[in-house]
Amino acid sequence: MGFLLALPGGAKMAMLAAVAVAVAMFYWHYTVVKGERDAAMAQVGALQVANDIQVNTIFTLESAVQEWAAQASQMQETLGAMQEAQVEANKHQRRIADVLGKHDMEVLALGKPVLVERVINRGTADVFSMFESVTEGE
């Protein structure tokens, strides 16, 4: 500070002006940088909120995909069971068509009505039980 007193008056003023300008520049730089930092922090906060929303959306979508896969697997199992039931029904249909092709039902019905009635009742019961087994999941 002693060197400042040794300077002539104009130099002192110039030196004080330079110091004042430097302080003003530092203050301006500080406020600009602080403002930019505050704006960046606000943007980081907004991006964090957007990121949280996206993470939740991804979690929801992953859950939906897992649920869909489980339902698809269950549907595949049900389809397999229905195909097996269809194969059994086709075998039964062929067996009945073979029996009916070998016998004249009109002659049997007139000659042995009780026998025909029992066979028809048993066949009807079989058909109803097949319908129940196929539709029991609905």
Image: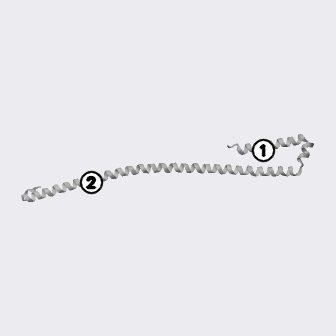
Residue plotted at (61% across, 49% down): 71
Residue plotted at (24% across, 55% down): 29
Q: Where does residue 40 sit, x and y in percent of width and height?
A: 34, 53
* Quarter-of-image position of residue 127: top right
Q: Where does residue 96 sit, x and y in percent of width and height?
A: 83, 49
Q: Earlier in the sequence, mark 1 or mark 2?
A: 2
User: Residue under circle 1?
Assistant: 127
User: Residue under circle 2?
Assistant: 32
Name the amino acid, label 1: Val
* Quarter-of-image position of residue 121: top right
Would residue 50 appear left or right of 72 to someone viewing this image?
Answer: left
Of the 4 image quadrants, the one containing the C terminus is top right
Of the 4 image quadrants, the one containing the N terminus is bottom left
Would residue 52 appear left or right of 63 to someone viewing this image?
Answer: left
Q: Where does residue 97 sit, x and y in percent of width and height?
A: 83, 51
Visible in this render: residue 98? yes
SS at circle 2:
helix
